[in-house]
Amino acid sequence: MRVVAELPHPDCKITIFSMNQKYIIKLEKGSFEQIYKLAELDIPEGTNGVFQILDEDFMKTAAERFDQMRADFHAAFKRYDS
């Protein structure tokens, strides 16, 4: 797996990898990750096409998903710790 790009973003760390003819988009925020896989053949523009997918709407919902992940994990840990 090789790193193709790292994108600066205020909400999370974005890393794009290439492996086995797939793009792997990894979003990281704290101890949480979201990973998306796309076939390179589905993105004829290459890495620039991946950048286009990561538009404002997508990043907004990804940030909301991180918030939900944190809330879900916190609730699960609270049940465990009780």
Image (cartoon, rainbow, N blue to C red):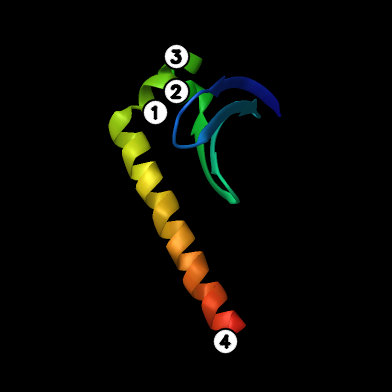
- Front position among marks 1 and 3: 1
Badge 4 crowding class, 10 Å Cα cut-off, few under 14, some 14 to 19, many 20 or more, is few
Q: Where, by quadrant of the figure, is residue 82 drawn?
A: bottom right
SS of the residue under disc 3: helix
- Front position among marks 4 and 3: 4
Give me the disc on residue 50.
2
Callout 1 amino acid: Leu
Query: Residue 64, percent across and down?
Result: 35, 49
Q: Nearer the viewer, residue 76 or 41?
A: 76
Say which residue label 4 marks.
Answer: 82
Tell whether 28 sits left or right of 20.
Answer: left
Reply above or below: 76 against 33.
Answer: below
Q: Earlier in the sequence, mark 1 or mark 3?
A: 3
Q: Earlier in the sequence, mark 2 or mark 4?
A: 2
Say which residue label 3 marks.
Answer: 48
Reply above or below: 70 against 56.
Answer: below
Badge 1 crowding class, 10 Å Cα cut-off, few under 14, some 14 to 19, many 20 or more, is some
Query: Residue 30, percent across and down?
Result: 57, 47
Q: CA distance from mark 3 to mark 2?
A: 5 Å
Q: Residue furthest bottom?
A: 82
Q: Are marks 3 and 2 in contact (CB under 8 Å)?
A: yes
Q: CA distance from mark 1 to mark 3?
A: 10 Å
Q: CA distance from mark 4 to mark 1?
A: 39 Å
- Front position among marks 4 and 1: 4
Q: Earlier in the sequence, mark 4 or mark 1?
A: 1
Q: CA distance from mark 2 to mark 1?
A: 7 Å
Tell whether 7 sits left or right of 45.
Answer: right
Q: Are marks 1 and 3 in contact (CB under 8 Å)?
A: no
Q: CA distance from mark 4 to mark 3?
A: 48 Å
